Amino acid sequence: MFENRKEAGIELGKALKKYKSARPVVLAIPRGGVEVGYYVARALECDFDVIITRKLGYPQQPEAAFGALAEDGSLYLDPWSNQYLTRDIITNVQAKENKEIQRRILKYRNGKELPSLRNRVVILVDDGIATGATIFAALRMCRKHQSKKIVIAAPVSGLTRLTALEAEADEVVILDKYQYLAAVSQGYRNFTNLSDEAVQRYLSNWRNQTIKSSPA
């Protein structure tokens, strides 16, 4: 069990050290993944940004996911969870979550697109993987954008999704694996939801560090 996301990010960065020479890009999934990803990117001294994905929840039970949507429209539908939903329901939920995706792109990246992922090693980072829906959507987006290698990395994960993730990703790096992970918070002693403002602070700190370290 990790004390907090900072500790988890530092430990995850150590586990990913072999990728430092590949000059990867760390893409974090907001919100919680941003704090973890920030410390991973510091350890690897590489590019860092956010990839926006949103869980698609049942209309009557939004916390239960039947899939996820990435910012470029890449879609993941859980093969079991969505089989009883109509196309209209799926489309309506997609439209609602796409509005939130656009809001986050504006807030976190000032409306800018991600830099090219073509032929790059991409490390997708989240603070934990329970259902895995948002990670699957992000992974499919990176594949569509012709990333050279896709590594999924998280401090904690349940075992139920790992086989499927390993089948789609080039590598999966998980520090603590749980037989059953009902919620990501199980893996942390101190776990609070990050606000938009907290996400912006991590991104702003990173951009400021990058500017300072750039040659004049």
Image (tube, rainbow, N blue to C red):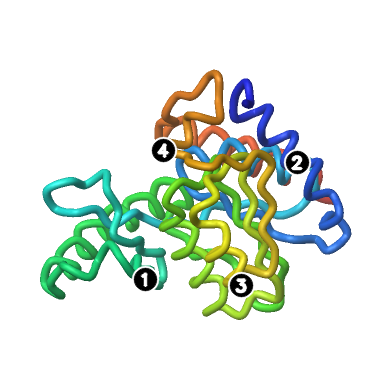
Looking at the rendered image, the disc whose residue lies closer to the viewer, 2 or 4, is 4
Q: Are marks 2 and 1 in contact (CB under 8 Å)?
A: no
Decide which of 24, 177 is in the foreground and name it: 177
Label 2: few (<14), some or many (≥20) within 10 Å? some
- With 45 as the anchor, is 64 left or right in this view? left
Label 4: few (<14), some or many (≥20) within 10 Å? few
Q: Are marks 2 and 4 in contact (CB under 8 Å)?
A: no
Residue receiving disc 1: 75
Badge count? 4
Residue receiving disc 2: 42
- With 82 as the anchor, is 46 left or right in this view? right
Mark 2 secondary-structure assignment = helix
Check disc 3 and give the amino acid type. Answer: Ser
How far, Cα to Cα, is label 2 from label 1? 30 Å
The mark that comes first in sequence, 4 or 3, is 3
Check disc 4 and give the amino acid type. Answer: Ala
Please say if 195 is above or below 164: above
Check disc 1 and give the amino acid type. Answer: Leu
Looking at the rendered image, the disc whose residue lies closer to the viewer, 2 or 1, is 1
Label 3: few (<14), some or many (≥20) within 10 Å? few
Image location (x, y in percent) of residue 191? 49, 24
Question: What residue appears at the point 72 percent right and 67 percent down from the top-left corner?
Answer: 121
Q: Where, quadrant-wise, is the N terminus in this rendering? A: top right
The mark that comes first in sequence, 1 or 4, is 1
Mark 1 secondary-structure assignment = strand
Check disc 2 and give the amino acid type. Answer: Arg
Q: Is residue 216 visible?
A: no
